[in-house]
Image (tube, helix red, strand yellow):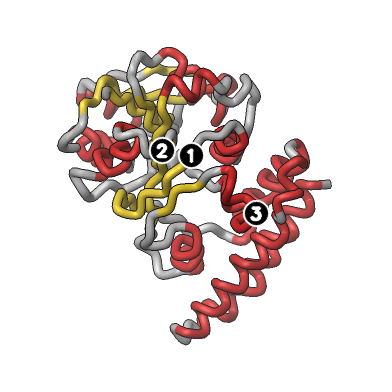
Amino acid sequence: MTVDIICPLYNAEQYIYNLDVAIRNQKGVNIGQIRYILTQSTDNTQKILDKLGINYKLINKQDFSHSLVREQEAYESNADIICFVSQDVVIESDNWLSKLIHPIIIGEADATYSRQMTKFNNIEKYTREHNYPDVSIIKTKEDIVNMGLKTFFFSDASGAIKRDTFVKLGGYDHKNLPISEDMYFAYKLIMNGYSIKYCSDSIVYHSHEFTLKELYDRYKLTGNFFKQNDYLDKFKTTSAGKELAMYIWKRIREEKRFDLMLRFPFDMAARLLGMKAGKR
């Protein structure tokens, strides 16, 4: 099967060279195209792309949409599999992609996503542990009763989908989704009887150091997403948040991270208040 990589770019000068090299160094895969979509930037991303001879599509800032840009590229692709990648993931293995798409090739799943780890020793370390454990799992509609909202957890920071399935289900329904477009589509997959596999052996590093304001703004967008898609609330969204908070606190105490004990209440408050503001 052929696979196209779809990767939106914006102010990506610190990422693009290493990311492109890592993708092109993947073994055991048949990559059709690497589809870079560059939103007009204020740094040297475009100059670097031109200097390296890397093909890309340039769009205006007002034309960017997390969902619509990815959807259009997926629709224009002729590959069997589409793989979404974020510009800031770090790929250190040359079999990241083969391990990600193998379950789709053998018919084990219709969509897959990678394990994400962080290089930072902050609270994100524990959120990554909780959301991306070291054991792979296949999720179907039957798992909703036990997993609730986590059944629809999926990430297009490093995720693959059988292209025919993406098109058949209507992608993102041509909606302009500023966040959680991956969960939006994962819900459609699961509810229509398809399966998603979390591939713990396909590893990328995805690291952030969010300020409290950035966390608040991010969760405000997430809250607004849940407000607009309130059918997800019946899958215990609040319980999922509490479970994550309890896991983080447990791990902070286990590792005696006194610095993070001080950060924890403010971090959780920023998330909770942002979510509530978005839902209002």
Judging depth in this view, the residue of 213 and 94 nearest the camera is 94
Which residue is labeled 3 in the image? 145
Is residue 100 positioned above or below 123 on the image? above
**Mark closer to the chain start, 3 or 2:** 2
Which residue is drawn at the image coordinates 39% and 17% (left, top)? 57
- The image quadrant where one finds the N terminus is top left
CB under 8 Å between discs 2 and 1: yes
Q: State the image quarter where residue 148 is shown.
A: bottom right
Q: What distance separates the C-alpha of mark 3 from that of mark 2?
A: 20 Å
Which residue is labeled 2 in the image? 109
Classify 10 Å Cα crowding around label 1: few (below 14), some (14-19), many (20 and above). many
Residue 209 position in % (x across, y down): 48, 59
Classify 10 Å Cα crowding around label 3: few (below 14), some (14-19), many (20 and above). few
**Amino acid identity at mark 2:** Ala
Which residue is labeled 1 in the image? 195
Q: State the image quarter where residue 30 is shown.
A: top left
**Quick one: SS at disc 2?**
loop
Residue 117 position in % (x across, y down): 38, 58
**Quick one: SS at disc 3?**
helix
**Amino acid identity at mark 3:** Val
Is residue 81 positioned above or below 271 on the image? above
Classify 10 Å Cα crowding around label 2: few (below 14), some (14-19), many (20 and above). many
